[in-house]
Amino acid sequence: MSEPITLMAAGDARDALAAAQRGDLPAAVHALMSIDPASWQGIEQRLAACGSSLPALLATLQERQTA
C-alpha cells in the first residue's frame, strides 16, 4: 500500500506543476521543497504505478510549454 498524501502536499504538488508549466522554476522548486517526506513517497509510488516519475512529468510540462 502507498504512503498517504496530505492535502497540503497535494496542493503543493499542484502548485509545483502549475509553476513548472508556466516556466516559473523558482516557484516550482519552492512548492516541491514544501512537500513532507511521507507524502513524497506516496507521490513517487503513485507516479511509478502509472509508469512515470516526477522528473518525467516536469519534462513533459516543459515540452508542452515550448511547443
Image (cartoon, rainbow, N blue to C red):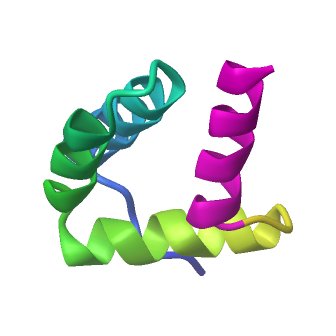
Q: Quadrant of residue 54?
A: bottom right
Residue nearest the viewer, comparing 12 with 38: 12
Against 36, is 18 above or below? above
Q: Quadrant of residue 53?
A: bottom right
Quadrant, the N terminus:
bottom right
**In the picture provided, is 20 more to the left or to the right than 12?**
right
Quadrant, the C terminus:
top right
For the point 37% across and 57% down, the residue is: 5
For the point 55% across and 72% down, the residue is: 44
Is residue 66 magenta-colored? yes
Tell me residue 52's x, y (percent).
77, 65
**In the picture provided, is 64 more to the left or to the right than 54?**
right
**Number of numbered discs visible in the structure rendering:** 0
Which residue occupies the extreme right position in the image? 51
* Magenta segment: 53-67
Tell me residue 60's x, y (percent).
74, 43
Is residue 64 magenta-colored? yes
Q: Could you tell me what secondary structure mostly forms the magenta stretch?
A: helix
Residue nearest the viewer, comparing 60 with 5: 60
Against 64, is 56 above or below? below
Against 64, is 55 above or below? below
For the point 44% across and 27% down, the residue is: 23
